[in-house]
Amino acid sequence: WDNWALLKVDHICFVSYGYREAFLRSLPYSVSVEKTSVIWPGLYIGDRYPSKEELRWILSERYKIPKETFWVSSLGGISERKGTLELVKAFSLFLREGVDAYLFLVGPVREESYFRKVKEASLEAAGRVKFLGYLKDPYPLIKASDLFVFPSRSEGLGSALMEAMALGVPCASTNVEGLRDLVCGGKYAIIIKEVSSEEILKALKEAFENPDRSCKIGYLARERIVRDFSFAKTVEEYEKLYSQFIKNFSFLP
């Protein structure tokens, strides 16, 4: 049905340039790029939260962990596509290097059998991996983190990564499909070259060992998200697109 629809519709709008390129390349037939457009989803998230330091005081009490440790967070449903297992294994290796750190996994369980593997792997971290499930407002924890990790295997754009960037948090991410629009070759996030514990460990170590560079990446990413991914800008782009269609449409009397 999707293939039938793609051939019948007048226009296809994608949420990212990277996803459009990957999707059109995978089709068994040709679709003209002129029949498509890209409009990034608007982000409506105002940073109304206290400073990182204030949040650390509050959250360290809530979760009973030292505020001086290295905090790593990740947001998304726990599933194979999201690379959760590799992240947990990488974090256990990170701890073995002597780093005093905690990993917060925010999001519901999507695959029960996969979750059991993740839980088993987390035992090596000796209580340093916190499974928080769904949080109505996860942004204070993300903002309080030293690093946000997004090791996804496939994304249309990656709203969780975009939200973390909007909060100015240093991020590490894979460079797949739509995420390319956000990481931009490593300018706005530390790139995880592949979804493996070894590559994720490299990203964790890079962020930990180069805090000034990580903070700069987080600052630049926030500036860009505010500039290019506002909700108002998205609405404006859709209005332009619809206006083009209206000009070419003849209304019957």
Image (cartoon, rainbow, N blue to C red):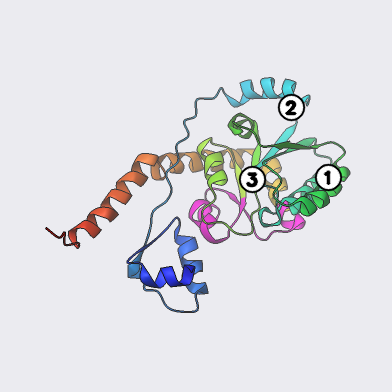
Q: Position of residue 239 (x, y in %)?
A: 28, 49
Quadrant location of the C terminus in the rendered image: bottom left
Of the residues under marks 2 and 1, which one precedes in the sequence? 2
Kindly report the distance in space between the C-alpha atoms of the residues bearing marks 1 and 3: 17 Å
Q: Nearer the viewer, mark 2 or mark 1?
A: 1
Q: Nearer the viewer, mark 1 or mark 3?
A: 3
First reached walking from the N terminus: tag 1 or tag 3: 3
Pick the front one: 214 or 112: 112
Q: Residue at x 78, y 46 (%)?
A: 91
- For the point 57% across and 44% down, the residue is 160
Q: Which mark is residue 68?
A: 2
**Viewer-closest of 156 and 1:** 1
Name the kind of residue labelled 1 in the image.
Ser
Q: Which circle marks residue 122 in the picture?
A: 1
82 displayed left or right of 24: right
Q: Is residue 144 above or below residue 84?
A: above
